[in-house]
Image (tube, rainbow, N blue to C red):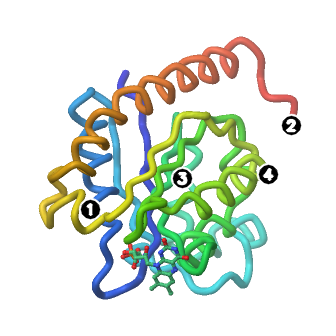
Amino acid sequence: MPNYIPVFYGSYRTDRMGIRLARYIVAQLQARGDEAELIDAQAVGLPMLDRMFKEYAPGDAPEAMAELAGKIRRADAFILVTGEYNWGMQPGLKNLTDHFLEEWFWRPAAIASYSAGRLGGARANSAWHATLAEMGMVVISSTLTVGSIGQSLDADAQPVGDGGKALERGFPRFADDLAWWTEATKAQRERRAPPY
Ligand SMILES: Cc1cc2nc3c(=O)[nH]c(=O)nc-3n(C[C@H](O)[C@H](O)[C@H](O)COP(=O)(O)O)c2cc1C
C-alpha cells in the first residue's frame, strides 16, 4: 500500500512562489510511489479560527473542515511547506493547522521551507519544528531549505539553476528519512495502540 502523504502549503498571496516547491514535492513523492496530495490552505478556505474541528457537534463542522479532518486522520505522514513572513510562520498555514489537534497525533512530519532570500525560510522552519512537536508529530531532522525560490524552481515547478540542483540533491535523503519514520510509526501503531 502506498503511503498517503498530504503536503500542506499556506500562502494566500496572489503572486505566491512557494506553490512551486509544494508542487515539486508532491510530484517527487508520487514518482517514488507515494499517494501524495497538495493541501492548499487557500483552496480549502477555512475561516480564521473560531471553533476547532473537535468543538463542533458531530456533523456540524463545515464540510471542508470535516473533509480535511478525515485526510489528516488517514495520513501516514505529513509534509509542511512553509515560507517566512517577518521571521515567522505564514498565517494561512498556521490557521489551517490550528483547527486540528488529536487528528495529527502519532505520525511523522517533515518541514520544507523557502524564501526569496538566501536563508531559505530557516527561521519559520525552526518555529514549525516546535509547533508540530506540540501537535503530537515526530518531526524528522532532515529538512529542505530553498533560497531564492523564484530562481530555484520555474513556474512549472521544475528545478533550475544552482538552487534547483541543490534541491534535487537534497530531496532523496529528506524523502528517505520520512519514509523510514513512516514505516516505524506505522509498525508501532499496529504493534501497540497509542496510549491516548
Ligand atoms: C509579509 C512578508 C514578509 C516577509 N518576510 C520575510 C522574512 O522574514 N524572511 C525572508 O527570507 N523573506 C521574507 N519575505 C519574502 C518571502 O520569502 C517571499 O516573498 C516568498 O515568496 C513568500 O512566500 P509566498 O510567495 O509563497 O507567499 C517576506 C514576504 C512577505 C510578503
How far is the residue under mark 1 from the one under mark 3?
26 Å
Secondary structure of the residue carrying numbered label 1: helix
Residue 178 spot, x, y in % from top left: 50, 30
Secondary structure of the residue carrying numbered label 4: helix
Q: Nearer the viewer, mark 2 or mark 1?
A: 1
Q: Earlier in the sequence, mark 4 or mark 3?
A: 3
Q: Earlier in the sequence, mark 1 or mark 3?
A: 1
How far is the residue under mark 2 from the one under mark 4?
15 Å
Q: Nearer the viewer, mark 1 or mark 3?
A: 1
User: What residue did someone put label 3 on?
Assistant: 70
Q: Is residue 164 left or right of residue 190?
A: left
Whether label 1 lies within 8 Å of ligand 1 gets the answer: no
Residue 65 spot, x, y in % from top left: 55, 69
Q: Nearer the viewer, residue 68 or 62?
A: 68
As displayed, is residue 144 above or below residue 146?
above
Q: Nearer the viewer, residue 21 or 55?
A: 21
- Please name the residue shown 61% across and 17% down the image: 184
Q: Is residue 115 left or right of residue 66?
A: left
Q: Nearer the viewer, residue 148 or 139?
A: 148
Q: Which mark is residue 97?
A: none
Q: Nearer the viewer, mark 2 or mark 4?
A: 4
How far is the residue under mark 2 from the one under mark 3?
19 Å
User: What residue did someone put label 2 on?
Assistant: 196
Q: Amino acid at mark 1?
A: Arg
How far is the residue under mark 4 from the one under mark 3?
20 Å
